Image: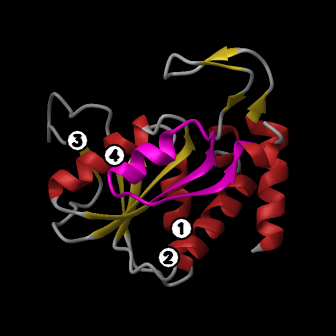
Amino acid sequence: MPNLLKELKELLDSRAFERRQVVLSSGKTSNYYFDGRKVSLNPKGAYLIANIICDMIRNDNVNAIGGLTMGADPIVGAVGVAAFEQGMNMSLFIVRKEAKKHGTMRLIEGPALQAGQRVVVVDDVITTGGSIIKAVQAVREVGCEVVKAIALVDRQEGGAEALLEMGVKVEAIFTAADFGL
């Protein structure tokens, strides 16, 4: 996995970070912007992310993996393919920002989650933890156990601590400090 991590770090550093003043979705101002989709929607990036996450969850007896749309979508799809190739049996899910107003009126898309299932929640970045918290709350309402949350990058701005207070362990592949930020 060390070579996968090195390759992913190089891709993230060259494609996903913009070092400039920006206002984040949390309303905070930052001297950089991170857009993980620039890597998770790249074939090589998707491959690296998926295989690294599969290694991170291999021994966790996970039944499903998913997260809040949009940051989680490409990660979830890529992990699903890699997990299948590696013989890891799990389902995938995406949590909508709000329940559909028509049709199935679902908040969680994908094969129905069942109470007692062990799930992992993913996202491209964690700042305040808002996106992951919303996904955690949605799957907990179904009765699932959140084994852990995984982010490509933790901005180290309190999100991991907020999730820990909810009883959710956070594992970031990288932190902002890994990129000198």
- Determine whether the residue tagged by mark 2 lies in a helix, strand or loop: helix
| Amino acid bearing label 1 | Val
Residues marked 1 and 2 touching at CB (< 8 Å): yes
Which residue is denoted by mark 2 in the rendering? 84
Crowdedness of circle 1 by 10 Å Cα count: few (<14), some, many (20+)? some
Residue 97 at what x, y percent from top left? 32, 32
Q: Residue at x 38, y 74 (%)?
A: 62
As drawn, the label of residue 107 is: 3
Which element type, helix, strand or loop, lies under badge 1?
Answer: helix
The stretch drawn in magenta includes residue 170: yes
The type of residue carrying mark 3 is Leu
Q: Mark 4 points at which residue?
A: 135
Q: Is residue 140 left or right of residue 33?
A: left
Q: Magenta stretch containing residue 13, yes or no?
A: no
Q: Residue at x 83, y 70 (%)?
A: 3
In contact (CB < 8 Å): disc 1 and disc 3: no
Q: Give the range drawn in magenta.
A: 149-176
Which label sits on residue 81? Answer: 1
Question: The C terminus lies in which quarter of the figure?
Answer: top right
Which label lies toward us, 4 or 2?
A: 4
Q: Is residue 132 visible?
A: yes
* Amino acid type, callout 2: Phe
N-term mark: 3 or 2? 2
Tell me what residue is drawn at x 25 percent, y 54 percent.
139
Q: What type is the residue that disc 4 sits on?
A: Ala
Q: What's the coloring here?
A: secondary structure
Decide which of tag 3 and tag 4 comes sooner along the chain.
Answer: 3
Q: In this view, does 119 lie to the left or right of 24?
A: left
Which element is circle 3 on?
loop
**Label 1, label 3: how many angstroms apart (C-alpha)?**
23 Å
Is label 3 or label 2 in front? 3
Q: Distance between the residues labelled 4 and 2?
A: 23 Å
